Image (tube, rainbow, N blue to C red):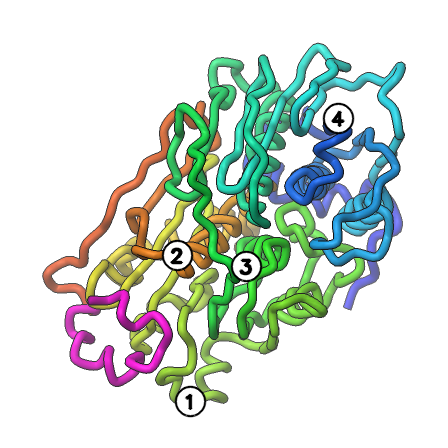
Amino acid sequence: MTNFPTSRDEFYRLRDDRTDRYIANREYQNANCLVTIDSDFVNTFTGQVTLLTTCNLLSRWCRNVLIVIPSVSTHKSLAAKIPLRNFILEQMLDADPFGNFRIEETAQNLSAQIQIHIGPNFEQRSDRYVLVNASGWYASVSTSKVIDLKASIDKNCIGAIAAACFGVSQVFKDAIGYPSELNIAEGIFDLFTLERVEHQDQCFQYPENVDVGRVLMVGSGSVGSAAAYALRTIGAMMDLTIIDHDNVKIENFNRSPVFGRSNYQHNKAKAVAQFLAGSSIKAHDFDGSWNDFIEKEGDLKNRFDVWLPLANEQNVRWSMQNNIPPLMIHASTTQNWGVNYGRHIPTREDCLVDRFPVESLDEYLNCSTGEVKIKDVTVDAALPFLSFFAGLLVAADLVRLGLDNYPQIPNFALVDFGGTLDQIQRFSKKPRVNCLCRTQVGLFERFNGETRYYNTHS
C-alpha cells in the first residue's frame, strides 16, 4: 500500500503518465476550459447527463475548468440527493483533488482558452469553442454553429454520453494544437447505427426496459468501468459478475469515469461494484484473475447470457473462447486515436481467436491501447476520452439486445477520433475455414442452449 500523493506535482506526474506516453505535446496541461449549457436544457435528463459526462471527462486531463450553470436540482433519474452543482464538483474533485474547478451561476465577464457549450442558445465567451447537442441515440458536434436536435421522448442518454466524448475530444485537440483540418467535422452521429446522418430520424428506437440478463464482465479497467458508468446512467437492469485482479492506481484516474481518490487502491472489480450499488444493476465482484475464477467456479455452462471480454492479461480472451462462450460484446482503443467495437455471435460470426490470432495478441488485445515498456514493466498508453467512448459502445450494444432484429449493425466498427470522423468504418467479419469456433459448433447448444440470446446464433 502506498499513500495518496500529497503534492500536485507528484499526482499529475502519475495521473498524466499514460497520456504523456501517447502524445509528445504537453500543452494540454496548461489549458483552461469554460463549460456552458442552455438554461432550459440543463433541467432535462439528457442535458444533465451530457454536462456530467463532459465535466467528468475534462477532470481527467484538464486542470482548470470553469462551469456555468444555474442553481438546479439533479434530475431524479440520476438518483443523486444533492444539487447538480455539488454532484458535478464531487465527481471532478474525486478524479482530481488538485484541480482548479469552479462553478458560477452566470457567464458574465467570464472567458477561457476554449469553451464547450451544451445544447441550444449558445452565447460565445471564447474565441475558440465547441458546440455539442444530444437527443436519444443522436449526438451532434460543431465548431461553428449550434445543431438543433428535437428532444428525446424517452430516457435514452446514449447520445448524451457520446456528445460529451466528441466534444471533449475536440477540446483536447485544440489544447494540444492539433491541426485544424483534423477537427471533428460538424454534423450528427447516430449511435444506433454507428453512422453519420444528414438529419435526425423521428423514429426513436429504445426498449421500454433495458433488462439485459446475466452478464459476465472480464476486466473492469478503463473500458469496463466506462461501460458500467454508461449502463448505470441509462438505468440498465442486469445481474453482473465482474472479474479483475488489479487495484486502482493514480495512473488509472485519467481514463476511467469511476476511479478516483474515493476508491484508490481498491480492487477494480470491487470499485466498479461499489459504484453500481443502489442502481438497478445487481453487481458481484471477484477479486482475482480469469484463471482464478475458472478454478473456483468450474463449469460455466448456461451461467451467463452475455460475456464482455474487456481485458487480455495472460491471454485471457484465448482462454475464454476455449470455454465455449455465449454472445460476446467488447470494445477497445487503438494506438492511434481509435476505438474498436466488436461482437461475436457463436456459430454465426467470427470468434475472439479468429479475430485476434495468437501472432497479433500482443499488438491488438489490450483493454485500452498499445503497451509501452518501462524497464521490466508494461503499461498502457491512453487518451482519456477513448476509453469512455469504448465503454459506451459496449453499453449501446447491450441496449440493442432488447430491440427487434438484433444484431442491427455489423460486428466490427472503427471510430477514428484522430481524424475528422466524417465516416465510421463498419463491416462484418466471418470465421476462417480453420478457426477454432468451427470445431465448437456441436458443443454450443450444450453449453449455452439455456441462455437468453441463444437464438441469435441461428
Residue appearing at x 57%, y 23% in the figure: 148
Depicted 292 relative to depicted 250: above or below: below
Amino acid type assigned to the residue bearing label 1 in the image:
Gly
Pointer 2 residue: 403
Position of residue 197 in the picture relative to residue 359 (left or right): right
The main secondary structure of the magenta stretch is helix
Tell me the crowding category of disc 3: few under 14, some 14 to 19, or many 20 or more residues within 10 angstroms, Cα based: many
Pointer 4 residue: 33
Residue appearing at x 70%, y 56% in the figure: 259
- Disc number at residue 298? 1
Image spot of residue 163 (x, y percent)? 57, 35
| Label located before the other in sequence (3 or 2) | 3
Image spot of residue 283 (x, y percent)? 61, 73
- Disc number at residue 255? none
For the residues labelled 4 and 2, the Cα–Cα distance comes to 39 Å
Depicted 229 relative to depicted 144: above or below: below
Q: Which residues are magenta?
A: 437-458
Amino acid type assigned to the residue bearing label 4 in the image:
Cys
| Label located before the other in sequence (4 or 2) | 4
In the rendered structure, does residue 230 fall within the stretch colored magenta? no
Q: Quadrant of residue 346?
A: bottom left
Residue 43 in view? yes
For the residues labelled 1 and 2, the Cα–Cα distance comes to 33 Å
Tell me the crowding category of disc 1: few under 14, some 14 to 19, or many 20 or more residues within 10 angstroms, Cα based: few
Image spot of residue 167 (x, y percent)? 60, 30
Q: Secondary structure at mark 2?
A: loop
For the residues labelled 3 and 2, the Cα–Cα distance comes to 23 Å
**The C terminus, quarter of image:** bottom left
